[in-house]
Amino acid sequence: MIKIHLGKNIRVFTWLVCRRLHTSCAIKNEEWITIMEILVLIKQVPDDSVEIKLDPATGAPKLDGVEAVVNAFDTYALEMAKRYIEDNGGNVTVATIGDDDATAALRTCLAVGAGKAFLIKDASFAGSDTTAKAYILSKAVAKIEEINGAKFDIVFCGKEATDFSKGMVGVQLASELGVGVATDVIAVDPAEGGVTVKQETETGYNVIEMTTPCVVTIQKPDYDPRYPTIKTKMAARKATINEITAADLAVDAAKIGEAGSLTKVLKLYEPPKKQAGVKIQEETVADSTMRALAMIAEAKVL
């Protein structure tokens, strides 16, 4: 994080400093400008707008013909990060754990404003649960910082992935990094010494001041992600996707893959189909109510 104090006559100086640092810089009316290095972690998932069935023979989801897309909550995270640097200056990097197919998701992110993209791939990562993934990502954060030559101030994650909806990686990553974390965030604003975040709760909102570096998991804000243009799509196709392997990260083999996972999926189930309702129409409202109560008692619902 680079912080610049603005006086009346140093706007040109500020611009020169930002140019010297090879980073973007937004000149605002506030006294302080906070230039952030932001990492957005994404996941490629099956399109959740399509109904997915389980293969009765294997018990695995039938994904033939289902398009892989960027997880919806991760698109909100990227949009929020992009809006932050547009207002305050900085750089946005995206990264994901996956195979070569995940490059499509990374190029989608590049097309809507990410500056750099990293694919974290290795056969030894297969079978990793959220604990193992958080460990891998913590190592990847350090490696990407080394490559970029700058420390990340904030790591953005979607609050959960739409495929399994566990919502654990962001919190576990913060634990691995030893930094603070805020979940279900819908706004991030600069503050002296860090950021102020707005967290959505079941009863309203919390406004939290956080020092950086930190991790935030993003809930849907009151705006939608931007769309790429033809020009940005073409540029994204030509962009370099940086690859990082287990050897690059010097990970402990006992902490990755199935060996490093504390949980295991034993079986997947499809949600039960909703049964048709029963229409109760007695001669009077009282009779209908009594009939409904009798049916509830018979079904032992209460």
Image: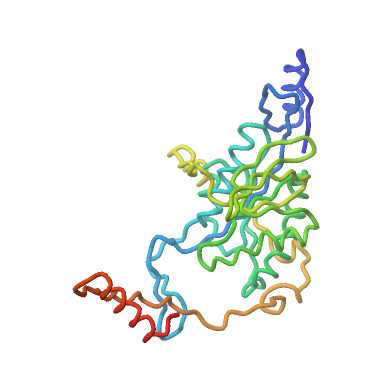
Quarter of the image that includes the N terminus = top right
In the picture, measured across the screen, residue 281 lies left or right of residue 227, that is left
**Quick one: which residue is furthest to the left in this view?**
283
Q: Residue at x 55, y 45 (%)?
A: 110
**Toward which corner of the image does residue 26 lie, by quadrant?**
top right
**Quick one: which residue is furthest to the top in this view?**
9
Work out whether 172 lies above or below 239. below
The front one of 72 and 293 is 293
Q: Residue at x 76, y 61 (%)?
A: 175
Colouring style: rainbow
Count of all numbered marks drawn on residues in the image: 0
Quarter of the image that includes the C terminus = bottom left
In the picture, measured across the screen, residue 177 lies left or right of residue 230, that is right
The front one of 50 and 221 is 221
The percent coordinates of residue 92 (x first, y second) are 64, 43
The front one of 120 and 66 is 66
**Toward which corner of the image does residue 97 lie, by quadrant?**
bottom right
The percent coordinates of residue 146 (x first, y second) are 78, 50
The percent coordinates of residue 50 (x first, y second) are 38, 63
Work out whether 197 lies above or below 72. above
